[in-house]
Amino acid sequence: MRLKLQSAMEYLMTYGWALMIIAIVLVALFQLGFFSSGNSVPRIPAGSCEVIKTVHGSNLEGQCNGPAPQYVARLGGTSYAYAPLGTYYGQNNPLTASAWVYMSATTNGPIFGVVNSPPSGGWSMPFISAQYPIIWGDIWNNAPISYSVPSPGWYFVAFSYNPTASGIYSLYVDGSLEASGTGQHSPSGSLDYWTTFVSGCKPGPSDCTDTVASYLTGEIANVQAYNTSLSANEINALYQEGIGGAPIDPTHIVGWWPLNGNVADYSGNFDSATSSSVSYSSSWESGYTLL
């Protein structure tokens, strides 16, 4: 018995410091969130999910179960991205635009801007813009609607418009309707482009304001454009898919730019974006809660 006790003491004396160091390291990693589910979620490579369009309709193909992206787009200074939306957005038609955006003290600028002379000129009006802590939504020549986020973090933002009757436009944040307004859109009447750079009118405290920056500063991901006004249930379902979610309605998708390491369009319409000085971040999970 005495020999066993002596051996145990010698073992502790020899390896005690090593065991203590291992314990300290494990505690530190736990506090940093290394073992949290947010860091163990599978990463979706760019292009692993896309919309396939055939004469029989549209459907999704690839890894489309909504894992987190490997990268998100980071914009700042004079960086920007823009891509064609077609002539549909240049008319007074039903539409929906959505994106994930990281809201922080420095977030400012167009999230889903629309122009007819890229990257920033001609007719202009972001359907969605941000100036922390406020997210703005608007259609041209109407009163802006807004929502103030409670804290920094990732938010899913969607804007829908339906021109029927008196017209209604709505702003959704994290799947919930937060503001709405009535009025008819006064569109460009020509080919339009999605852009994060708008030198002209931007929704803010008024319909055409200079308080919102011309260039978006911030992180965004998973930009989607539809040629239909998605229902509240569809928008909530799109939010529930998470930041890596695929289009909820592949038949009506106009453009899908995941921004997962590139500016390619995965909607099946082949309208990849043009970008300038856009960088991509792989350490973006702070402020994102897995659904």
Image (cartoon, helix red, strand yellow):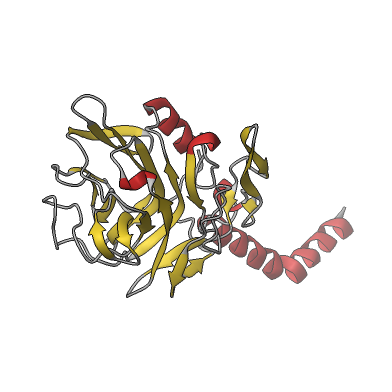
Q: Residue furthest front?
A: 190
Figure quadrant of residue 264 = bottom right
User: Quick one: 153 or 220, which is closer to the camera?
Assistant: 220
Count of number-bearing discs: 0
Q: Residue at x 63, y 60 (%)?
A: 23
61 over 232 or under it: above or below: below
User: Quick one: 11 or 211, which is closer to the camera?
Assistant: 211
Q: Position of residue 115 (x, y in %)?
A: 30, 58
Does residue 90 appear left or right of residue 265 in this picture? left
Q: Residue at x 64, y 56 (%)?
A: 45
Q: Residue at x 62, y 50 (%)?
A: 40
Q: Position of residue 144 (x, y in %)?
A: 16, 44
Does residue 163 appear left or right of residue 261 in this picture? left
Can residue 222 be seen at all in this image of the molecule? yes
User: Quick one: 147 or 104, which is closer to the camera?
Assistant: 147
Figure quadrant of residue 131 = bottom left
168 over 100 or under it: above or below: above
Q: Position of residue 246 (x, y in %)?
A: 55, 42
Does residue 249 appear left or right of residue 109 in this picture? right
144 over 152 or under it: above or below: above
Q: Residue furthest left?
A: 206
Q: Residue at x 50, y 66 (%)?
A: 281
Q: Position of residue 75 (x, y in %)?
A: 39, 68
Can residue 104 be seen at all in this image of the molecule? no
